C-alpha cells in the first residue's frame, strides 16, 4: 500500500469516527443523562439544565403581546395562570393517569416539526402514556397570529391536528382566505371557524399561552412542560424518552 493511500484511509477513518461520535446518543451515556434544576418560585417544576435548538422571531416579534394588550392586562393574565398553573397548562384532565405534556409551538418554527414527529412516535409506541396539550404561541408576526387563531378555533370542531399538519406542509399562511380554503377541504364548518377565529374566547386562549410562556421564561419555540419538567428547545428523541421515563418513575404532578 502506498503512503498516500494509507494516509487517505487513515483520514477517512478519522472523519468517519468524528461523524459517528457526533451522531452518538451522548445524552444517554453514563453521567450524561438529563440533569434537572428546581425552578425557584415555581414548585414543583424543574427545568432541564441544558436546552435544545430554539426558533426565535426577530426582535420585533418575540415575546411581544398584541398591541391591544396593555401592561396591566398582561400582568393580570400572568396572575391568573399562576393561580391555577396546572389547569392553565394541562387543562381539566390532568389527573387522567397519563403524563401531561404542554407543547408550545409556532407553525413557522422548523425545530417544532421534528419534535412533533418525535412526540407522535412516542404516543404511537406507548398509547396512553402521554397526553399532549397544544399551546399555539405565534412569535413570527401576522401570519403566525392568523394560523394560531385558526388552529385554536379548529380545536372547537375536533380538527385542530389535521389543520395544523396541513399548514405545517405549506410555506406561509398568507391570509384568512387561504385558511378557510384549506379548512373547507378538511371538512370544517368555515363560517363557524371564521366566527371562532375572531372571538374573544380564542383571543383569551392565546393570551393564556403568552402568559404561560412568560411564567416559564420561554424565549422561543418549541417549549415543553413534560409533567414537572420544563425545557425550551428541540431535543433528541432519546433524551425525550428518558425525561418521560424519569417522569413515569415519580408520583403524578400536583400543583
Image: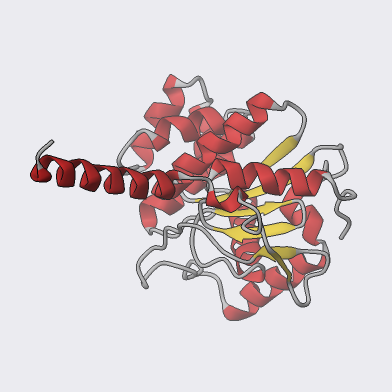
Q: Position of residue 210 (x, y in %)?
A: 59, 63
Figure disc tally? 0
Q: Residue furthest front?
A: 1
Q: Residue furthest bottom?
A: 71
Q: Position of residue 106 (x, y in %)?
A: 47, 50
Q: Position of residue 20 (x, y in %)?
A: 39, 43
- The reply, left or right, for residue 64 in relation to residue 57 is right
Q: Is residue 134 visible?
A: no
Q: Residue at x 68, y 64 (%)?
A: 47
- The reply, left or right, for residue 206 in relation to residue 91 is left
Image coloring type:
secondary structure
Tell me: residue 156, above or below residue 208: above
In the figure, residue 159 lies in which quadrant?
Answer: top right
Q: Residue at x 75, y 72 (%)?
A: 79
Q: Quadrant of the C terminus?
A: bottom right
Q: Nearer the viewer, residue 41 or 62?
A: 41
Q: Nearer the viewer, residue 228 or 243?
A: 243
Q: Nearer the viewer, residue 88 or 67?
A: 88
Tell me: residue 36, above or below residue 160: below
Q: Residue at x 9, y 40 (%)?
A: 2
Q: Residue at x 42, y 20 (%)?
A: 185
- The reply, left or right, for residue 64 in relation to residue 122 is left
Q: Nearer the viewer, residue 246 or 225?
A: 246
Q: Position of residue 182 (x, y in %)?
A: 40, 28
- The reply, left or right, for residue 210 in relation to residue 242 is left
Q: Quadrant of the N terminus?
A: top left
Q: Is residue 217 visible?
A: yes
Amino acid at each position: 500500500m502506498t503512503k498516500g493511500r494509507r494516509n487517505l484511509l487513515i483520514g477517512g477513518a478519522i472523519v468517519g469516527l468524528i461523524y459517528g461520535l457526533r451522531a452518538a446518543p451522548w445524552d444517554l451515556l453514563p453521567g450524561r443523562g438529563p440533569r434537572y434544576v428546581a425552578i425557584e418560585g415555581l414548585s414543583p417544576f424543574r427545568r432541564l439544565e441544558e436546552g435544545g435548538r430554539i426558533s426565535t422571531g426577530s426582535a420585533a416579534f418575540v415575546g411581544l403581546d398584541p398591541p391591544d394588550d396593555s401592561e396591566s392586562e398582561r400582568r393580570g393574565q400572568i396572575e391568573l395562570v399562576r393561580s391555577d398553573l396546572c389547569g392553565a397548562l394541562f387543562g381539566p384532565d390532568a389527573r387522567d393517569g397519563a403524563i401531561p405534556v404542554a407543547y408550545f409551538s409556532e407553525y413557522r418554527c422548523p425545530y417544532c416539526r421534528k419534535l412533533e414527529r418525535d412526540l407522535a412516535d412516542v404516543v404511537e409506541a406507548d398509547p396512553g402514556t402521554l397526553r399532549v396539550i397544544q399551546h399555539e404561541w405565534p412569535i413570527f408576526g401576522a401570519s403566525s397570529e392568523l394560523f394560531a387563531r385558526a388552529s385554536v378555533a379548529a380545536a372547537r370542531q375536533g380538527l385542530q391536528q389535521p389543520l395544523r399538519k396541513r399548514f405545517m406542509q405549506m410555506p406561509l399562511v398568507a391570509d384568512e382566505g387561504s385558511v378557510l380554503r384549506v379548512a373547507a377541504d378538511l371538512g370544517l364548518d368555515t363560517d363557524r371557524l371564521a366566527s371562532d377565529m375572531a372571538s374573544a374566547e380564542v383571543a383569551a386562549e392565546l393570551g393564556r399561552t403568552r402568559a404561560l410562556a412568560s411564567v416559564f421564561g420561554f424565549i422561543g419555540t418549541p417549549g415543553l412542560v413534560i409533567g414537572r419538567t420544563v425545557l425550551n428547545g428541540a431535543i433528541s428523541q432519546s433524551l425525550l424518552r428518558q425525561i418521560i421515563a424519569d417522569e413515569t418513575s415519580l408520583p403524578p404532578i400536583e400543583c
